[in-house]
Amino acid sequence: MKKIPLKKLKEIDRILFFVPLLLTITGILTIFSATRPAFEPSHPPFYIRQSIWLVISLFAMVAMFVFDYRWLQRLSYYLYGIGLFLLLLTIFEGYIGMGAQRWLKIGPIRFQPSEVFRIILIVALSNYLQSKRSPIDGITFGASLLLFGALPFGLLFKQPDLGTAIMLFIISASLILIYGVKRKILLTTLALVLLLSPLSGKLVWHSLKPYQKNRLIAFVQPERDPFKIGYQIEQSKITIGSGRFLGKGYLKGTQGPLRFLPEKHTDFVFSVFAEEWGFLGSVFVLILYLVLVVRGFETAYIAKDSFSTLLATGISLMFLLYVFINIGMTMGLMPVVGVPLPFFSYGGTALVSNFMAVGLLINIRMRRYRLFY
Amino acid sequence: MSNKRRIAQFFTYLTVALFVVLLLRLWQLQLLKGDYYLAQSIKNRIRVVKIPAPRGIIYDRNGVKLVKNAPLFVASLLPGISEDSLDIKALSELLDMKEEEIRKLISGQDTKRLEPIRLKAGLSFSDVAKIEARRSDFPGLIIETDVTRYYPYKKTASHLIGYLSLPTVEQLRKRSKKEIVQNAPVGQWGVEALYDETLRGTPGRKFIEVDALGRQLRTVSIIPPRRGNDITLSIDINTQIEAENAFKRKSGALMAIDPRNGKVIAFVSLPSFNPNEFIHGISQDRWNKLINNPRHPMLNRVLQSQYPPGSVFKLIVAIAGLEEGVITPGYSVDCKGFISVGRWRFRCWKKSGHGLVNLRRAIVESCDVYFYEVGRLLGIDRIAKYARAFGLGSPVGLKLCTERSGLIPTTRWKKRVRGRPWYLGETFNAAIGQGYVSVTPAQAAVMVAAIANGGTIYRPSVLLDEEPQILGKVVLKPSTIRFIKRAMYDVVVNPRGTGWRARSGVAPIAGKTGTAQVVSRPADEDESKRWLPRDHAWFVAFSPVKNPEIALSVFVEHGGHGGETAAPIAKKTIEQYIKGNEKNTP
């Protein structure tokens, strides 16, 4: 483990550094606007907190690329164990918010273990896979799917954090698949899934919380929507649509401050941005995300070993899914699953972990030529 | 790891594809449907509240306010408040309302409407203080202030002035050009209804920015309401009060008009109602009571009741006789108390008979037999011609309510309606204003006004500054008018005149009594039972005899003989009016 020489600083990828930073600053400005007080005596300090989190996040990011990523590889299983333990702890000791136990309280700070767990999972799975021969055999396949797919899914589902659970499962499965699975095993699994899907579908449906069922009903059949979940979506669409081409102008949006739009500074922050900056601003933000994600996949391509390829792919896929599902949700393309928009939505733990993920991508790019330095 | 390149390519394409989906959706929402969503976002936060316009004031001819606009306090609930968030029981105690009533109002709210739900209107100051003190216990409960209508004269002239109440479902559906405000009452009767659009004004609008909880942030803009126009009626409230008091709680009607222009001076229909009862919504119970009251307080007797005019009609027959030349003032008939036609006997009201009477005595003493003879000479159709010329048999055109037209029968009418020929006996009945003949008190007033002014039929008008409208002119010989007026004066001043109770020291009054028979009496009926049930009393009059300023008709239900109950009412009314005019023009 060697420290990075100062002259190598210029090898930090500018796109991976500045795009998330730009997105976060835009996000803070939007949070400021969304939480503008209408009746409240003062401005809620969300934007200040998010700014502090940004500073912390930048340190976390630097920490992720200063050292060779291989130290992570060595620690990955321990970290994974801790991560699983924290998830378990959240179920029992979790701080309840919005019908779900997602927070853990350590001293004065609350944090969401699942947000950090995302990164740990990708790191641990990548490390596990690269230690096996590609394509992997049945035992490895089963073990990886159970350990890195089903287990975290179950724990997150129990929290309940369905959105994260599904997304992490997709990421894990994708990583296993792209690493390579023997054809015979793949076909057997596929057949099994097809056979069991009606049963598991039922099982999953019955274990859903009522509010989760409502969200799904609202999405599939908006006209049936018995609990007015559709109101959120409709208001979000109104918020976005009313921005039209140029937007209403910064601090001129009405939907957020007047409370027509729920979750205005967290899950639906993009709607507030789209209202004030219009189509033009929204396309600009979409392009930023596109650039970030594509840069991530390119990093995976140029990475020097299997571990870093898997890691970069996992991280990029994670960003892609989060962005698509969140923005899709605000525009009524996806059911409301409560997934924040990376770098944009208010939330400290998520911001730190996203910058850590970006730090890892930068790390991989920096060290793609030589084995050691 | 199989092929890094292919994996990277696959994910890049996937990324681009997903972003294109987002982009297209963004395009659809912001560019294709942007205007729609912008309108939606404005609708979200801007609430339009109608500001009711203050209604025009109604004055009497001397500038006395007949109605007032008074402040109104209403306990209302902000829209969107659900039943569960309220302690309905406590609220019902606070407002002194039934729980079901409140529940009905809340559940019946139109969810699209953003106006507060009015729970109780017309709160007193102490009510307001009581509610204000406990408002924090009831989220969404507010005190609204509004303007209401107050009728200081209460039951007086209520059939003329009318009343206001909340628009009916029908009225809301129709919504005339000047928009009806849901919570603002509209004119439902009398002048309030007839001149509703004049009085109503134009409601203003207030645009308020609100948040999702309905809390008001600021007023964005205000379009101020335009006050309704005032109206000055031609009635004299003092004369009106005097006239109503003169009825001494009897049912009946009185219409006094200025014979020079048709302006209505007094308009009495008794019993009447208190217009203040309706404005905040009358209870079903109370309404049923009004409607089912055997004395029919909601009936406008001036325009909506028609009765045989009795001897009042003899004026028409006399004029017709003189004009047609079938009689002269000197034409005499010997009244033996009855006249026989075949096996029928037509009686005079005076059993013993009047003896030999000329036209003047026949009018003064109201001899029936004399007019049977004149009727025989004229025939029904010639009587009808004059009756119609004086405005009888058709509405007078006072559009205060649906008006009845009375009936002036003719031979053609009988053929058409009854399919039978006209009989002489029916002419006798008609000649003394009984039988088929019926008139409304308004028609009687127009008729007597025309006699007073020499034959001009004015359309009665209740607005002081409205141009007088002439409906027709009866061309009469001056001698006829002179004679009839003189005879009518004699009815009052002659010791034997039937209208002696109208004799006045204040002003010379000319009049004619009338009695509308309620049941036909058998010929040999006992004299003491004669007025049971009592006949309706009529009296038409004008004053002063020279240059008349007031002409009126008085109708008293079951008032007995016209001279008995109706004449004193006419006298008091005329005296009040003449005295009032003298005071006003020193």
Image (spheres, coloured by chain):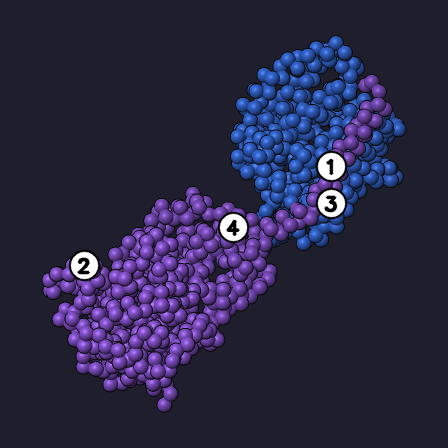
Chain colours: A blue, B purple
Image quadrant of residue B403?
bottom left
Residue at which label 2 appears: B343
Chain letter of mark 2 equals B
Q: Is residue A159 left or right of residue B311?
A: right
The amino acid type of the residue labelled 1 equals Leu
Q: Residue B166: x percent and y percent?
A: 43, 57
Chain letter of mark 4 equals B
The amino acid type of the residue labelled 2 equals Arg
Disc with the residue nearer the chain's start (3 vs 1): 1
Discs 3 and 2 lie in a common subunit: yes
Q: Residue B104: x percent and y percent?
A: 40, 46
Q: In the image, which is nearer the foreground, mark 3 or mark 2?
A: 2
Q: In the image, which is nearer the foreground, mark 4 or mark 2?
A: 2
The amino acid type of the residue labelled 4 equals Arg
Q: Is residue A62 left or right of residue B364?
A: right
Calculate the distance from the C-alpha at mark 4 to the C-alpha at mark 2.
Answer: 75 Å
Calculate the distance from the C-alpha at mark 4 to the C-alpha at mark 3.
Answer: 30 Å
Local SS, label 3: helix
Local SS, label 4: loop
Residue at which label 1 appears: B22
Q: Residue at horizontal 72%, vertical 38%?
A: B25
Q: In the image, which is nearer the foreground, mark 3 or mark 1?
A: 3
Local SS, label 2: loop
Residue at which label 4 appears: B113
Residue at which label 3 appears: B31
